[in-house]
Amino acid sequence: MTQDTADIKPPWTPLKIIQWAVPYLQQKGISHPRLDVEILIAFALNIDRLKVYLQFDRPLDATELSRIRELLKRRSYNEPLQYIVGKREFFGFAFKVAPGVLIPRPETELLVEKVLEYMKGIPEDQRTILDLGTGSGCIAISIAQNIPCRVWATDISLQALEIAKENAQKLGVEGNIQWRMGSWFEALKRDDPSDFRLIVSNPPYIAIGEKGELAPEVRDFEPPEALFAGESGLIAYEQLAQNIGKRLSQKGVIFLELHAKRSDNIKQIFKKSLPEWRTTLFPDLQGLPRVLKLEN
């Protein structure tokens, strides 16, 4: 594969690839090199990861070896594993992801869980949901997969919306979701609902000054417009707060994902625009405030 592998005799097998590639990726600063190598081998060979173990001694032909080499090279440059294999698991479903689309995070599953808990108590004909900044569509689609409802989902990125549509079609909920391109509420059309029973969003919430704290695969590859929210990290919440109350139906509810360090600041932003509303914070598995619920 490279001059570094001259001491390894052919034929190359999955086991030999792992023995060479794990320390190679480790030297490049990859945090889970063994797992990544196994996933990339499985992807290159179009087999399940478990079958990599069952085929440890399988000789690899030149085409297979070339493909594995190219995938490992991309990962060594910190390209996210999810972009390389083109998917990410979220809420039990496989979502297509690609450069230009934020990779779904496990902590966002809490946001979906809270929406579903609330919506189960709402009559089906009142289940209108607005997902602001939908990205891959993981929130909107996961909700629509688990409960009968009507969802409108917005994003400023055409690329993100195209991938979200693909995900909805693949997962069989394309008829339940309306996709709208534009900034927040401006994306909605005239004949869309004037208000919604529930509004949900995972907006960008990282301050520009925190960029250096991010892992290279996040900082250098994921779309900055989905990550950063000005110097304060609060701009998206301030923009949402300007109109969010006007687009909620009577007894409407808002669920927002938060930056744990700024939960108090975010609560105050919405307290100014919705002073009579009750606020509830839900912690993630690490005990950090992750989801904000606002209800009147």
Image (spheres, helix red, strand yellow):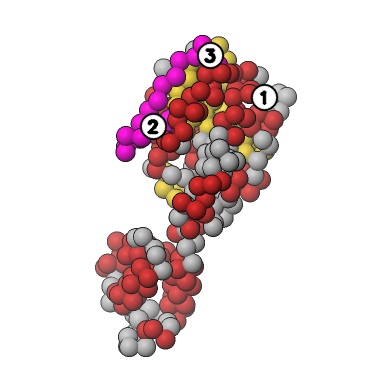
Magenta residues, as a range? Answer: 274-291
Residue that appears at 54% across and 47% down: 209
**Would residue 289 be counted in the magenta stretch?**
yes
Residue 282 is at least partly visible in this image: yes
Q: Position of residue 250 (x, y in %)?
A: 55, 11
- Which residue sits at x=43%, y=83%? 2
At 35% across and 31% down in the image, what residue appears?
Answer: 283
Q: Would you say 194 lies left or right of 217 here?
A: right
Give the Cα distance between marks 1 and 3: 27 Å
Q: Which residue is mark 2?
A: 289
Mark closer to the observer (1, 3): 3
| Label 1–label 2 contact, CB within 8 A | no
Q: Is residue 38 left or right of residue 244?
A: left
- Residue 273 is situated, as x and y percent measured from the top left of the image, at 58, 18
Q: Quadrant of residue 263?
A: top left
Q: Residue type at mark 2: give it.
A: Pro
Mark 3 = which residue?
275
